[in-house]
Each structure stands twice: as C-alpha cells, then as structure tokens.
Amino acid sequence: MAIWARRPRTPSFIWKKNWGDDAFARGAYSGYWTQGLWTTYGPVWRESIDSLHWAGTETSPDWNGKMEGAVQSGMAAADEILKAL
C-alpha cells in the first residue's frame, strides 16, 4: 500500500486554546486590533507614497495577520509596481 493511501491515525488527545483569552499572548502571532481599527484605517495603510509600495500581512485586505495575507499583499504590491513602470 502506498504511503499516501494510508488513513491518518486517530489522535488520543486534542488540546484547544483560545489565544484571545491569554493575558500574555493577546491574540497569538498576529496583532490584536481593537474593534473597528482595521476597517477604519486599513485602506489608508495600503496606499503607496510616491514610489514606495507597502506589502505585508498588515496591509492585506483579506487574511490580515496570516501568511496567506502576506503573500496576497506582496502580489498586489508587485502588480502596483509593474503598472507604475
């Protein structure tokens, strides 16, 4: 039998944690924004300044704070630069 055809084993233990309730993590690996902050200021943070274009998870319109958002933001910035050239 091929390795990829095997079924995964059933876990014997699952540990769940709400990072938003952790006093020290305050939301895990991402910024912990207050309500309305991102929807109010997010579009302004993405605006380019002359030839300076921003990219990063904080400037992503979707998946903010996640790796997917950083990749999406980088691709958007690259498109902006190509259009500017």
Image (cartoon, rainbow, N blue to C red):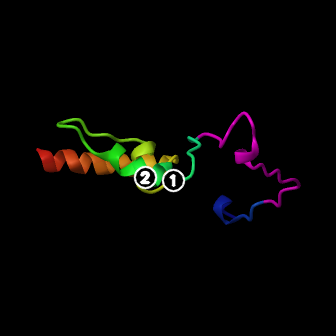
User: The residue under label 2 is which amino acid type?
Assistant: Thr
Look at the numbered disc 2 and give the secondary structure of its residue: helix
Which residue is at the far left? 85
Left or right relative to 58: residue 80: left
Query: On the rendered image, what quadrant is the C terminus found in?
Result: top left
Residue 25 tag number: none
Instruction: Check if mark 2's residue and mark 1's residue have beta carbons within 8 Å.
Output: yes
- State the image coordinates of residue 71 (x, y, percent, origin top left): 41, 48
The magenta-colored residue range is: 9-29
Which residue is at the far right? 12
Residue 41 vs 51, above or below: the answer is below
- State the image coordinates of residue 25 (x, y, percent, origin top left): 69, 36
Name the residue beneath numbered marker 1.
36
Magenta-colored stretch includes residue 26: yes
- State the image coordinates of residue 79 (x, y, percent, origin top left): 23, 51
Identify the residue at horizontal 44%, vertical 57% (top origin): 62
